[in-house]
Amino acid sequence: MARIPTICPFCGCGCSMYLVVDGGRVTGVEPSPANPINKGMLCAKGWNAFEFVHSPDRLTKPLVRKNGVLTESTWDEALDLVCSRLTGIRDTHGPDALGFLCSAKCTNEENYLLMKLARSAFRTNNVDHCARL
Amino acid sequence: MAGLAAAFGSGAMTNSIGEFEDADLFFVIGSNTTAQHPLIGTRIINAVERGAKLLLFDPREIQLAPFASLHLRQNFGTDVALVNGMMNIIIQEDLYDRPYVESRTEGFDELKALVSRYTPKVVEQITGVRSADLYRAAVMYAQADKAMIVYAMGITQHVTGTDNVKTLANLAMLTGHVGRHSTGVNPLRGQNNVQGACDMGGLPGVFTGYQRVNDPASVQKFEKAWETTGLNTKPGLTITGMVEAAHSGSLKALYVMGENPLLSDPDLTHAEHALGNLDFLVVQDIFLTETAALADVILPAACFAEKDGTYTNTERRVQLSRKAVEPPGQARADWEIVSELLSRLGCCGTYPDTESIMREINALTPSYAGITYRRLASGYGLQWPCPNEEHPGTVFLHRDQFTKGKGTFLPCEFRPPAEAPDEEFDLTLTTGRIYYQFHTGTMSRRIEILEREAPQPVLEINPEDAKRYGIRTNDLVEVESRRGSIRLKAEVTTRVPRKVLFTTFHFAESPVNRLTTSAFDPVSEIPELKGCAVKIRRCS
C-alpha cells in the first residue's frame, strides 16, 4: 500500500490529501495532518474524492464523429484530425475563428501549454476558462 | 477580478486561509461558505466560537446564519447601494481611517461625494435593510481591528459584478482594512485551479502572471521564449464572447479542455445552439459530459490522481500533486496531449515531464519565478508572488503599498438587476451550490455517498409564496423563465425570503441554466447567473 500526496480536485480551498493506493487502484483518502489549509480535515466531497477515478464511465479511447456518430478511433487519427481541421479553419477564416477553453480543473502546466498552443501555434487570444461561471 | 485589479493592482485573495484564525470580524457577502468552501467555513465557525464577530449579508438563511452577530437579508441585487450606505455612515460618523486614506489611497473626495447620496432612508428603500441595522453593520465593520471581507460568486455573478467588487474594495480601503495580517478582501475561488488557470494566462488579454498581450515588452519576451514572431496583440474573446461569436457564425472551432459549458453556461438553449453552429468542436475530458456529447473529436484525459502537476488554490498557494495510479485504457494526461499537439504543429519545446513545463513558466513569470519543483517537493507549497528561489512566498498582499502603488477608490452608483420580476414572471430565481454536490456534477454525481445525500435538485420556496400557489414540500413544480422551463421538487422553507426561489445547477436532469439570463457585466463579462425573473406552477 502506498500513500501519494495530491490536492483535492473540488473547490478552491486546495486541501492537501494522500491517495491510498493498493494494487494499482485508489482505495481511499487520508487528509494531510500538518498542512496549513485543512490540518487533517476534509469535507464530504474530499473524503470521497477517489470514487469517480475508477468509474466505469471514464473515457478510455479517442472518439471521432463519423457520419454523425461518435466512433472509437486511435490517438494518431484523432490528433491528425484536430491539427488539420484547426489549421484549415485558421487558414480559411483567420486565427480569431478559433477559441480555446482552458480549465479550472487542470494543472498549471496544462493550462500553460494550452494557452501556448492557442497563442503560439494559432495566433489567437481567444483563450478563457470558466472562472466566470 | 477586474474590480479588485482596478482598485488594488491585483485581483487575487489578499490574505491566507490560516489568517482566518486571527481575524476579529468576518464580513461575509455572496458566499455560502460552509457549502462551497467547507474548510474555510469551518475556520469561520471556529473563529466565531472563539469570540470573532460575523457580519453576514445574504438574502438566504444559509448555514452560517445562526453564527452571525448580525444577519441582514438584503433585496436581491442591491449590494452596491447597501455598501455605499455603510460607507456614508462611516464617513458621517468619522469612523474612517483618515491616515490610511491620506497616505495609501486616491480618489476619496469622489467617493465621499457619491456615497453621501446613499442616506439610510434611500438605502432602506432599495435594499430593504432597516436604517438601524445598516448603522450597526457599518459601526461593527469600521471599529473591528482585524476585519476580513469574504465573498464569492454571489458578488460577481451579477450585471453589476465588477461594481460590487469595487464597492467592497472601497469599503476596505476607507477603514484601513487591507494590507495587514488577518485584514483584507478575499474572493473565494470555486474550483481547485481557477486561480492557477488565471495565473497561467487562461484569459483573453494576458500571458502568464497577468502580463498583457498588448504590452510590447511582454510580447517580445514570449516571442523570444517561444521562438516565434507575429504573436497576436489584440485581446481575445471571453467565454461569453465566444458563445456569442459561435452563435453569429464568426467563431468556427472551439477546443475545450476539462470544462462543461453546456451545463454551467447561462441560457443553455442559446449556448447549445451556439455550440451546434460550430464547424469543429474538440473536447478533452475524463467523462462524456453534456458538452462532449456534441463534439467532433473527444480526447480521453487522465484525472487528478493519474498525473503530476501543480494547482494554485484560492490563497495563491501553488502545491504539487503526484501521480498515484495509471489512467484507464488509452487516456492520457492533458499536458501530454497538448504537448504532442504543439510538436505536431512545429512549436518549440519538448516536455518529457511536468517539471520541464514549470521551468518554462518560472522563466517567463516573475510572480512564479521562485516556485520550483525542488522547493514544492517538501513543505506545503509556496504562495505567489515568489520572485526568486530564496523568497519564502507572500502570505498577504499590499503590506506597505498596493501592488499598483496607491489604492484607488472607484465609487459606483447602484444599478438594478437586468431582469426584474413583473406581473407575469413575478418571482426571482437565484442559483448556487450545495454541500454534497459540485459544479456540473461530472465528478460528484459519480460518488455514491454524495448521490445518496443529494440525489436530486430541490427548489426552495418561501411558505407564503408556496401557500399562494398551493405548493407543498415534495410537490413537483414547473419553473419557467422567458428562455425555458424545468421541473423539479419543491421544498417549502423560510431559508429563502418571500418572492425568491433557490436551486442549484448540479443536476443535468433539471438544468437550471435553461432559465438563467445571459445578460452580463460589461467589464468582466460574467453573466447574471444569480438572478432572473420566473413564474412557478404546481404540476398536477
Image (cartoon, rainbow, N blue to C red):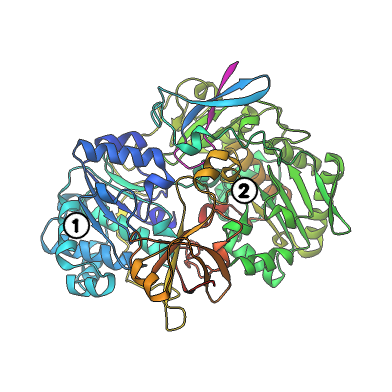
Q: Which residues are magenta?
A: A1-14
Q: Quadrant of the C terminus of chain B?
A: bottom right
In the displayed structure, B292 sits above or below B528; it is: above
**Which-is-in-front pick, marks 2 and 1?**
1
Relative placement, left or right, of B281 versus B470 is right
Q: Nearer the viewer, residue B223 or B120?
A: B120
Q: Position of residue B296 (x, y in %)?
A: 79, 55
Q: Position of residue B269 (x, y in %)?
A: 63, 68
Q: Secondary structure at mark 2?
A: loop
Q: Nearer the viewer, residue B296 or A129?
A: B296
Q: Which residue is mark 1?
A: B137
Q: Position of residue A57 (x, y in %)?
A: 71, 42
Residue type at mark 2?
Answer: Cys
Q: Is residue B379 magenta?
A: no
Q: Which residue is mark 2?
A: A102
* Real-space Cα separation, disc 2 to disc 1, in angstroms: 40 Å
Q: Is residue B181 in view from this perspective? A: no
Q: Residue at x 85, y 59 (%)?
A: A68
Q: Residue at x 26, y 56 (%)?
A: B171
Check the residue under mark 2 and report the chain it is in.
Answer: A
| The disc label shown at residue B67, or none | none
Q: Residue at x 21, y 41 (%)?
A: B52
